[in-house]
Image (cartoon, coloured by chain):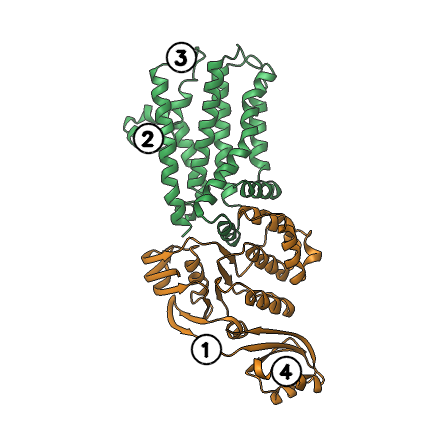
Chain colours: A orange, B green
Amino acid sequence: MKIFEANKASKKIEGKMLLKDVSISISQGEKVAITGKNGSGKSSLLKFIGGIFTETDGQVKRNQINIGYVPEHFPENIRFKIQDYLMLTGKMSSNVDEGFLKRIEKYAKLFAITEFLNTPLKNCSKGTKQKAGIIQALLKKPNLLLLDEPLTGLDDKAKIELLNQLNSLKRDVTVVFTTHDSLLIESFAGRILTVESGRIISDSTTNKKEKVRIIKAKTLNRVILAEIPSIRYEFVGEDFVEIIVSANESDQILSMLLERGCSIIGLIERGE
Amino acid sequence: MSAFVQYQLISFIRSLKFIPPVAFFFAWIFILYAYKNVPILSSYAVSSIALYLIMTWMTMSIFTLDEESEKHILISHLRSKLSYLYGKWLTLLVIIIPLLLFAVFFPIITESFKGNMSLKLYIFTFYSHLVFVLFGIIVGTLFSATTFATKKYAWLSSVFIIVVSLASKSIIEIMAFAKWILWVFPPVFKVVGYTEDDNPLLINKYILFDSVFVVIYLFVAAAILVPLFLRKEG
């Protein structure tokens, strides 16, 4: 089922053309990454797909579905404590039941913000606000999840947890996200849209037949990574590394890492 | 919708943006009834105008309360931009109800009036105050939640509309042709025109005709604001 279809659509705001000649369709369950340079129109395309922006020209069809939205920068001046904010926004979506508070507590624990639940959002760090933004969207149990640079401001543990949560979403949940982060694209996206000057210049699907695993490890010696047969790796901070490996080779690589004095922090799986 | 109204009310109160208009309103009412034995209808006309001013003020404050990303999150939860607009209007009505009741009952409780209230006067009083509240919401929405809001001098424009609508009778007396232009402004004199002297309020065909005009004006204005709001919100 198509949840979004656009034919030569464009979007103009205050005389400025944000999107031009957009012709795409997105099916239910697709995991779509939007990439491009700063100011290329990634966020505008994300909002356009979700209906936050509507077309100025062209034809667009959007299914009326439950949308969860996570902005790139969580609002700075929200005048609520985190738990009150999540409860109120939850009530707006009319899905608050007896277990709702438990779900808030569960997500708070997963994203390590339990101690801040009764802290005013204004007083929270950027990362904590971003986590609250992600949780409010996940609590909606959306059919379409829109994530605008979701890894921005998140600590390493929260990044891994977000990937875990995204991978645990039902298969029919559509996810569209903007990112500069290749880790998120490689570990989650099934399709990549590249935007430049408001136009989609590339629309490609990724080959996800092979299962891959992401190993998060602590290492004091970066040189050893050269010996590891990974698909790719990326250092996160001083001592941590995220290694994307073939699922078939993961046990062998875990063993190699342990033999070389690394500590394994986490392991997540993705793929078809 | 009740959760959204609750969210907006708490957010508005915690922002402290309500203090200037509410303080202005109470000061206006206390000064108005500083003297005893004041005429009923003209006093209520003045308190209605006070509500017109502060409602415009509060509407502009309420519509500029949410940051852009906060608004987008709220719309995603409400599932529609229209629900966001209606929720804001509902919030404003909830805020103004206690002030409206205060404006009506304060002079009665303090026995400030020359004369007694009647059922007819109560009906006209509530009608007059409510209409001016709605005029305020319309002017405030026009300059804070539509494409006009992005223009410079939004506050100045809203004050201009209020002043011209309140001065429309005098303007037309000086320049008769102005009546062909001024009908687009809130028709305040179709309400306060019946409160100018202290004669008993007469329910006749003129007041009924003007009331129908005012109600139609309010519906048409609200109907025009909806697409203007949607156009601004993308």
The alpha-carbon separation of the residues under discs 2 and 3 comes to 24 Å
Tell me residue A269's x, y (percent): 58, 74
The alpha-carbon separation of the residues under discs 1 and 4 comes to 23 Å
Amino acid identity at mark 4: Asp
Query: Mark 2 against mark 1, which lies toward the viewer?
Result: 1
Residue matched to label 4: A251
Query: Mark 3 against mark 1, which lies toward the viewer?
Result: 1
Query: Mark 4 against mark 3, which lies toward the viewer?
Result: 4
Residue matched to label 3: B202
Amino acid identity at mark 3: Leu
Same subunit: marks 4 and 2: no
Same subunit: marks 2 and 1: no
Tell me residue A23's x, y (percent): 34, 65
The alpha-carbon separation of the residues under discs 4 and 2 comes to 80 Å
Callout 3 crowding tier (Cα within 10 Å): few <14, some 14–19, many ≥20: few
Rendered-image quadrant of the N terminus of chain A: bottom left
Query: Mark 2 against mark 3, which lies toward the viewer?
Result: 3
Residue matched to label 1: A207
Same subunit: marks 1 and 4: yes
Q: Chain of mark 3?
A: B
Residue matched to label 2: B183
Question: Do callouts 2 and 3 mark residues in contact (Cβ within 8 Å)?
Answer: no
N-terminal-most mark, 1 or 4: 1
